[in-house]
Image: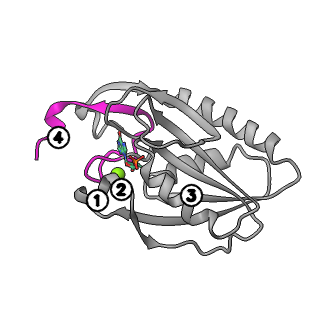
């Protein structure tokens, strides 16, 4: 593979470490929701890889839904106000809803989304995120399932992009500075 190998500075989390962690998370989720069915909500695009792999470790009836959001741009980024580009197909009322995220950075996007989703009266609403950046969450967020806490560095791979590239890397890594050049 390695179409992008030269752009990667270092591998932060290897493919087998990610898969092992997702298996653990899936086992925990399966135990926590025993006897129920789950609606997994993915935030496009980054979450689609995590969602595909995590869901296969959840031994419960599962349905899938996706939403696409965009922030209102640099000026309003700190407000965390996001625009919903694609809304969910499912009604959330009385459902057990698990939002699946690739990464929680400032947490602002997620905070906004959770408020929006909570208004639709699900029975339960929790979050599973593969990555969480250490120490910089600007908002108080209760992320029930976290894969890895990582340093505050920009990472790509496993769903995460820079300029829409690198989402298909099977590991999480950082970019060489040359890869940021236009
Ligand atoms: P937040 O609102 O600051 O938590 O960030 C929300 C979104 O920013 C994430 O869902 C990602 O799409 C993107 N993002 C944040 N950090 C990174 C990163 O290190 N690499 C790639 N995308 C990131
Ligand atoms: Mg992105």
Q: What's the distance in space between the residues labelled 1 and 4, CA to CA?
A: 24 Å
Q: What's the distance in space between the residues labelled 4 and 2, CA to CA?
A: 26 Å
Q: Which residue is mark 3?
A: 114
Q: Is residue 65 visible?
A: no
In this picture, is 128 found above or below 131?
Answer: below
Mark 4 vs mark 3, foreground winner is: 3
The residue most toward the right is: 35
Q: Nearer the viewer, residue 18 or 136?
A: 136
Q: Nearer the viewer, residue 100 or 168?
A: 100
Q: What's the distance in space between the residues labelled 3 and 2, CA to CA?
A: 15 Å
| Disc 3: CA contacts within 10 A as few (<14), some (14-19) or many (>=20) | some
Residue numbers of the magenta segment: 161-182
Residue 176 painted magenta: yes
- Determine the secondary structure under disc 4: helix
Q: Which residue is mark 4?
A: 180
| Disc 2: CA contacts within 10 A as few (<14), some (14-19) or many (>=20) | few
Horizontally, is 147 left or right of 171 in the view?
Answer: right
Q: What's the distance in space between the residues labelled 1 and 2, CA to CA?
A: 5 Å
Measuring 32% from the left and 52% from the top, which residue is drawn there?
A: 78
Q: Which residue is mark 1?
A: 76
Q: Which residue is mark 2?
A: 79
């Amino acid at each position: 593979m390695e179409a992008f190998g030269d752009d990667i500075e270092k591998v932060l989390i290897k493919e087998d470490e990610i898969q092992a962690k997702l298996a653990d998370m899936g086992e925990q989720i399966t135990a926590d929701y025993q006897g129920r069915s789950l609606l997994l909500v993915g935030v496009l695009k980054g979450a689609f890889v995590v969602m595909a792999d995590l869901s296969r470790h959840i031994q419960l009836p599962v349905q899938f839904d996706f939403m696409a959001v965009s922030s209102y741009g640099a000026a309003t980024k700190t407000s965390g106000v996001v625009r919903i580009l694609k809304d969910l197909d499912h009604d959330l009322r009385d459902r057990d809803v698990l939002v699946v995220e690739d990464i929680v950075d400032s947490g602002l996007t997620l905070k906004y989304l959770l408020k929006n989703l909570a208004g639709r009266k699900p029975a339960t609403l929790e979050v599973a995120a593969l990555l969480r950046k250490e120490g910089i969450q600007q908002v108080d967020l209760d992320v029930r399932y976290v894969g890895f806490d990582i340093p505050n560095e920009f990472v790509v791979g496993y769903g995460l992009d820079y300029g829409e590239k690198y989402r298909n890397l099977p590991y999480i890594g950082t970019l060489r500075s040359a890869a940021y050049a236009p």
